[in-house]
Image (cartoon, rainbow, N blue to C red):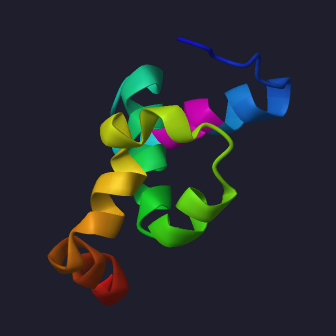
Amino acid sequence: MYMPNESEMASVTLRRLSWLFKLPMSKTLDHVKEMMLSQVDPRAVCLACKDKSRCSKCFFNKLTISPATLALFASS
């Protein structure tokens, strides 16, 4: 799995969020990503995607298929 190097500021920020959430940094990063997902339109992600070969395994594609899930995103 690809994991980009993060800046010192990003690392310091993640550490502070970890203290806030009382989670290890790795779990905090997952938590932050999940929070961010509620702010992203999955249809926009699909339109911007440059690798259409993995749609069947993509989290965002599954969201675009399910109107109930899209309604959950709209209500948050």
**Quarter of the C terminus within the rendering:** bottom left
* Residue numbers of the magenta segment: 14-18
In the current view of this chain or complex, which residue is farthest to the bottom? 75
- Report x, y in % for residue 22: 33, 36
Give x and y (percent) for residue 71: 25, 84
Say left or right for 5 vs 54. Answer: right
Q: Residue furthest top?
A: 1
Q: Is residue 12 left or right of residue 29?
A: right
At 27% across and 66% down in the image, what residue appears? 65
Above-or-below relation of 48 to 24: below
Q: Position of residue 11 (x, y in %)?
A: 70, 26
Q: Residue furthest front?
A: 53
Q: Quarter of the image holding residue 35?
A: bottom left
Q: Is residue 66 rendered to the left or right of residue 16?
A: left
Q: Main secondary structure of the magenta part?
A: helix
Left or right: 44, with 74 as reference point: right
Res 72 seen here: yes
